[in-house]
Structures are given as structure tokens and as C-alpha cells.
Image: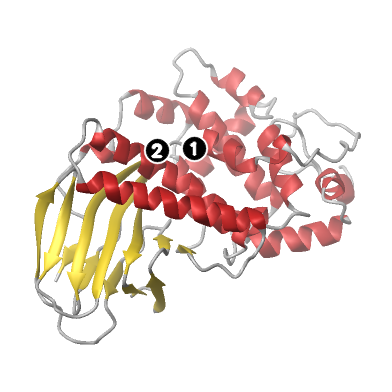
Amino acid sequence: MASASRAIIGISRGARRTSDVPPPLDMTLESDWLSRFMALVTVTGKLEIRCAFGAPWAITYERSPACEIPYHAVLRGRAILENPDDGTVRELGGGDLVLLPHGSPHVLHDGSGLPPVPAVKRPGGHVFIGENAGTGERLDMLCGRFVVAPPHDRLIRRHLPDDLVVRAATDSRTPDALAATARLTALVELMRAESLEQQLGGLAILNALSAALFALALRAISESGQAPTGLLALAGQPRLAPAIVAMLDDPAKPWTLPELAALCSMSRATFMRHFQSKLGHSAADLLTDIRMSLAANALRRPSASAEAVSADVGYQSVAAFRRVFTRWAGMTPGDWRRQSLDGPRDATASDDGEAGDAE
């Protein structure tokens, strides 16, 4: 048995080994972990409703399906977000954006404590418009959802927290953080403008902008250091980011803890402690999730054999790969291939305008 200090993490027994510690990565284009991550998962977006309310108002959202991530962008005014599951209460101001990666049930309201004025929903441009007769403080807010193609919703929920808030007024004064927030604000304003007009191609443009919103939000949160835990908190730590880039860049490599620690200029013990603290999972867990996500993508190709896929993601033992994939996906590689080729229903195809119950 290999010593603990050289244990290979997250791979099968038959995987290849190496004793060479790779040199530190050039922290330029090679450090773009987010582009690699977005290439791994498939995320589409849909802007559903623009809320133009006067206080008092309230909207209730039930728990979303596993593959959906609700989002809300406050353009003007103020909103209170409450999560009845854990009691979390957050105040959102103009320019703030919130994502709920776990699809948690939530309530948005004006915070007055008064009974909400009933709202109505009508078609308006390319999205629905929610309005009420409230005469109090005005709210202008865009609401929609991101749809994550299975099985990548598991990756999202495992490595992102219950809610992610991008603040327009970030405490971080770094140029990257300020630029990311400014671009996010500009994108949301463009979405608002497109939602108000019935221009040619407007619906397609809105959905494309909504999908871009997801990546830009992840960038802004990572750059600002606002993520409490998870992948974005990990990536926001310059000393730990090289390990993420390495695993995303070459997931089939039999990475060892000393190799990953060396990339981050840390001792093995320090690396393990900081990685677990920020991500909430071990490096082995993240590597397995990356490998199985890649395998799920590859298995969509009818010509890809289990043997080829297992080798591509770092396994020389097909039996070991099948065991890990089945445990990760809840079904065998063959069952996943059949399900994906059957063409599961695209959640964005449902256009009933249901984006929460306005009261």
C-alpha cells in the first residue's frame, strides 16, 4: 500500500501514477477556472417576469425542481428575501442580484409587515409584467431561472451554497471585483431594456443574456470574496485557485495531495485544512465530481464506449469507473446513456409564465 503522503486521490486502483510534482501554473489565461467549469456544465437561462410593485407587496416561491436555479435582480427599490427552511433573511437593494442554487423555497416582500396588495400579471414585451396598486415604495425587479442540464445539477448544488448574493456596493475595492460588478449591472440593465420592447429576436437575446448572467454572477461573487463557502469561496483564494485549475485542466491525471499542495505553495496538511474549510469537501471529492461530470457528457455520444470514457477520466479499471459513476449519478453509465439519448424534457420549454405567486 502506498504511504498516506503519496496517496492518490479520487482515482481507481489501476490508474497511472507519477512521482513528478508539476511546476506552478502560469497564473494568466491558464488560471481561467470559470471558463473550464462553464464548459463542463450546460446552463441555459430564462427571464420570466418583471415585477413593478408598490409596497406593500409579497411573492412566494415553492421549492424549484432539481435542475432549476431561481434568480432575482433588483433594479430599483428594496426587497427582503426570506428562506423558511433555515430562517435566513437578506435585504436586497438596487443593483443587487440573488441566486438560489439549491432551489430553496423563499418569499420576497417589501419588509413593511403589512398585508400585501394583490398583484396581477400581464403580457409585456417578451416577459410577463407583475403589477399591483400599492402606493408605497416602488420596486423594479427581474425574476427568472437558470436551468442546469442533468446530472450537472448535482455538481452545482454540491459546491455552491444555498444562496448567492452579488452586492452592487461591494466591500472589495480590487479592480477585478469592481469591473465584474459593473459589467453585471450593465448586463441586467440591458436585460431590462430588452424586456420592455418587442424588438426582433428579443426573446432569444433575453434568454442568451440570462445564461450569460449566470457566469458573470459567479465571476463577480468569486472576485468580490462574498461567497461564504463552496467552489466560489475556494476560487476566490489566490493560493488555492491553482489546485482547481489543475484538476479542471487535466482531470485524468492521478493527482496526489502533495502535488496539489505544491501547486499552491503549501504543505500537505495546510493545503488539506484550507481546501476543506473553503470548499466544504475534500480535493478528492471535487476531482471525482469533475471526472464524473465529464464522463456524463461523454456518455451522451453513442459511439463512446465505457472503456474509452473511463480511461479519459482517469480510470483504467472499467469496473471501478462503473462503481463510482453509479454511486455519483444514482444510475449505471449505461442507464445514464439511455436516459440522455431519450432526450429528457428541456425545462425552459415550459413557458407558462409561472414565476412565483404574487400576493
Q: Amino acid at mark 2?
A: Ala
Question: Going 50% across and 48% down the picture, which residue do you hit?
Answer: 216
Question: Going 17% across and 42% down the picture, which residue do you hit?
Answer: 351
Q: Where's the C terminus, which quadrant?
A: bottom left
Q: Where is 1 relative to 281, above or below?
A: above
Is disc 1 in contact with disc 2, using a CB cutoff of under 8 Å? yes
Q: Amino acid at mark 1?
A: Val
Q: Secondary structure at mark 1?
A: loop
- Relative to 230, is 210 on the left or the right? left
Mark seen at residue 124:
none
CA–CA distance between discs 1 and 2?
A: 7 Å
Mark seen at residue 149:
2
Q: Where's the N terminus, which quadrant?
A: top right
Classify 10 Å Cα crowding around label 2: few (below 14), some (14-19), many (20 and above): some
- Relative to 226, is 131 on the left or the right? left
Mark seen at residue 41:
1
Q: Secondary structure at mark 2?
A: loop
x then y, percent, for residue 203:
24, 37
Mark 2 or mark 1, which is nearer the start of the sequence? 1
